[in-house]
């Protein structure tokens, strides 16, 4: 029998999350790694749920001498996959190793690199959660989800299209206070998700607030340091991430009907405008951003765990995503949102539209 790695004998730190009924527990000897994962998914902490998936994270380099000379089954820019029976090995080019025991649903992660340990866990949790929610006909959309006056708005924008910048400006007190009137305690602008709101068969957007990433050059000056930290990534450069808990009073907490869909386009100049858009044009954007899922981390190494049959079954997920997208469009107004280089003007354009229409 293949030896799966070190047993956890020292003090354990653990946490459990519930992603709409999908339970994941994480155990780790390294308290800082666990703290970072806690910050990434704090909205979903639930110690009462029984986990379907368990992680065990080891602060040590993989011991490759104990594993057999398996042949690779899949290559990606970030890792190489191997299989033997109920076991899948995902090797991060000698710097880290994930061993998946499919018979027990235990994921063991080995790496002496703190940044890599964190990223492996974060991306694996996203991939597993996405697959589980897909099976429940709850699908992710690559875009910004907002709740305004109890209505959900989806802004479909490409990576680097300005979602985060727009969001941070909108959530500043001095901007959203213009909506409040005499009610100083209300906050009608709420965050559903900065990068991947969920949509269901009833035409609702479901909250999926996770950490928010910003480039080093765009690091906000008005967010306390304890809510922001620098991470190193495998394929891309370093970036700062903002804890979703920083926005805890401005997070949407329940399903909200989607009534507006905006398709964002960047403009080189300072133009900023919102104009009606045909539903056919909006559907093309939803196909890109949800049905296909460009911009969403899918984790192809995990999608391929079940071989060809798993990919065949995936076609049913594509149909389900399309169905949800059509339901959303049938009940929403659709607009083109031209986003220029003047951040203040972009925010004013959006706020003015919402004052008059939402």
Image (tube, grey):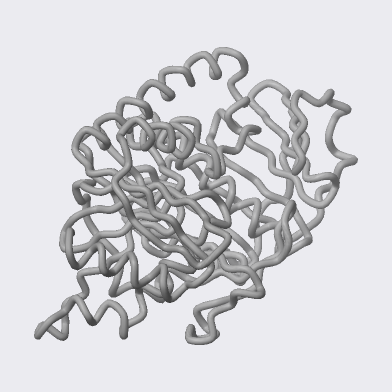
Quadrant into which the C terminus falls = bottom left
Q: Residue at x 9, y 85 (%)?
A: 182
Q: Nearer the viewer, residue 94 or 199?
A: 199
In the rendered image, which quarter is residue 28 located in? bottom right
Q: Position of residue 58 (x, y in %)?
A: 69, 56
Q: Which of 153 and 311 is in front in this view?
A: 153
Q: Is residue 113 among what the camera can see?
A: yes
Q: Where is residue 203 in the image (x, y as percent from the top left)?
A: 22, 38
Q: Which residue is drawn at 46% across and 46% down?
A: 142
Q: Is residue 15 among what the camera can see?
A: no
Q: Which of 243 and 128 is in front in this view?
A: 243
Q: Position of residue 211 (x, y in %)?
A: 49, 63
Q: Which of 176 and 131 is in front in this view?
A: 176
In the rendered image, which quarter is residue 238 located in? bottom right
Q: Residue at x 41, y 68 (%)?
A: 346
Quadrant into which the N terminus falls = top right
Horizontal side of residue 113 vs 280, given as left or right: right
* Total residue callouts: 0
Residue furthest to the left in view is 182
Q: Position of residue 154 (x, y in %)?
A: 33, 50
User: Compared to 8, does 270 lie above or below?
Assistant: below
Horizontal side of residue 64 vs 233, given as left or right: right
In the rendered image, which quarter is residue 13 located in? bottom right
Q: Residue at x 62, y 26 (%)?
A: 305
């Amino acid at each position: 029998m293949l030896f799966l790695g070190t047993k956890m004998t020292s003090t354990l730190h653990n946490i459990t999350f519930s992603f709409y009924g999908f339970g994941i527990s994480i155990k780790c000897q390294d308290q800082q790694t666990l703290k970072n994962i806690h910050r990434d998914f704090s909205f979903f902490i639930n110690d009462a749920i029984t986990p379907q998936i368990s992680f065990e994270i080891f602060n040590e380099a993989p011991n490759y001498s104990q594993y057999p000379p398996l042949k690779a089954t899949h290559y990606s820019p970030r890792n190489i996959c191997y299989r033997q029976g109920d076991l899948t090995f995902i090797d991060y080019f000698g710097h880290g190793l994930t061993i998946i025991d499919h018979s027990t649903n235990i994921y063991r992660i080995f790496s002496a690199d703190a940044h890599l340990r964190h990223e492996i866990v974060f991306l694996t949790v996203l991939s597993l959660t996405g697959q589980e929610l897909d099976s429940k006909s709850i699908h992710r959309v690559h875009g910004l989800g907002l709740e305004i006056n109890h209505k959900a708005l989806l802004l479909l924008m490409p990576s680097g299209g300005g979602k985060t910048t727009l969001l941070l400006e909108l959530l500043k007190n001095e901007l959203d206070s213009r909506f409040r009137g005499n009610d100083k305690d209300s906050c009608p602008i709420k965050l559903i998700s900065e990068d991947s709101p969920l949509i269901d068969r009833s035409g609702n957007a479901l909250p999926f607030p996770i950490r928010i990433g910003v480039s080093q050059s765009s690091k906000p000056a008005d967010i306390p340091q304890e809510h922001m930290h620098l991470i190193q990534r495998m394929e891309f450069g370093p970036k700062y991430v903002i804890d979703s808990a920083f926005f805890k009073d401005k997070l949407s907490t329940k399903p909200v009907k989607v009534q507006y869909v905006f398709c964002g386009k960047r403009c080189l100049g300072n133009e900023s405008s919102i104009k009606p858009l045909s539903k056919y044009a909006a559907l093309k954007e939803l196909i890109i951003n949800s049905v296909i899922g460009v911009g969403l981390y899918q984790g192809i190494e995990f999608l391929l765990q079940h071989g060809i049959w798993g990919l065949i079954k995936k076609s049913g997920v594509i149909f389900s995503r399309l169905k949800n997208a059509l339901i959303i469009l049938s009940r929403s107004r659709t607009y083109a949102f031209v986003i220029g280089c003047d951040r203040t003007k972009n925010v004013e354009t959006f706020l003015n539209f919402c004052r008059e229409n939402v």
